[in-house]
Image: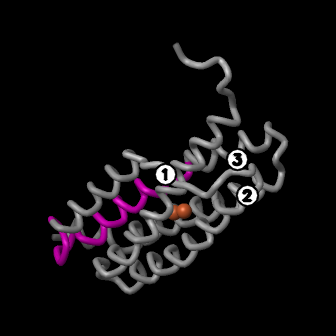
Amino acid sequence: MPSKEKGLEDLFHDALMDIYYAERKILRTLPKMARGAQSKELKAAFEKHRDQTEGHVERLEQVFEIIGKRVQGKTCPAIDGIIEEGEEILDEFKDTAAGDAGLISAAQAVEHYEITRYGTLRRWAEIMKLPDAAKLLGLTLAEEETTDKDLTKIADSSANRKALAA
Ligand code: FE
Ligand code: FE
């Protein structure tokens, strides 16, 4: 029988550990993606987002502090799978005309995962009356959304056309 004592605070804590694990994994993966990118623009976008991701990890540590919990990650099979697929694309399409388009598609899957997590966490923080946590989560959410849009721009301006022409 599930415990009736579990509520939104528990869900919030669980999702926080999930995204903390995911962010740390993404932090280790972005340099590989930057190395795998062919265009300078895409390489720079991955490097910029790697630096932003350090900030995401720090903001999450602040949120743990706000809710009085130990900073701790919890294995997130979703991000493990998304990154595994990205690594497959990198292996199979590296140095081909479709390489950058493939990398962008993989990176956008990661950003969309983050966007769904941060959207939920921010809303929960708001209704739990944790405005400081909601603000921190909202700042990261905005950076994930901007990154997603920037990746679409790179795909539209060059990567997709290069892949199509091959
Ligand atoms: Fe992030
Ligand atoms: Fe991100």
Q: Measuring 60% from the left and 66% from the top, which residue is drawn there?
A: 56
Q: Which residues are magenta?
A: 92-115
Q: Give the dominant element type of the magenta stretch: helix, strand or loop.
A: helix
- Front position among marks 2 and 1: 2
Q: Categorize mark 3 by other alpha carbons within 10 Å: few (<14), some (14-19), many (20+).
A: many
Residue at mark 2 = 65
Secondary structure of the residue carrying tag 3 is helix
Residue at mark 3 = 122
Q: Categorize mark 2 by other alpha carbons within 10 Å: few (<14), some (14-19), many (20+).
A: few
* Picture disc at residue 112: 1
- Place of residue 47 in the rendered image (x, y in percent of width and height, measured from the top left): 46, 80
- Place of residue 80 in the rendered image (x, y in percent of width and height, measured from the top left): 35, 53
**Label 3 is placed on what type of residue?**
Arg
Secondary structure of the residue carrying tag 1 is helix
Colouring mode (rainbow / by chain / secondary structure / one colour)? one colour
Left/right of residue 50 with respect to residue 52 in the rendered view: left
* Cα separation between marks 3 and 2: 16 Å
**Label 2 is placed on what type of residue?**
Glu
* Cα separation between marks 1 and 3: 15 Å
Q: Measuring 40% from the left and 53% from the top, which residue is drawn there?
A: 109
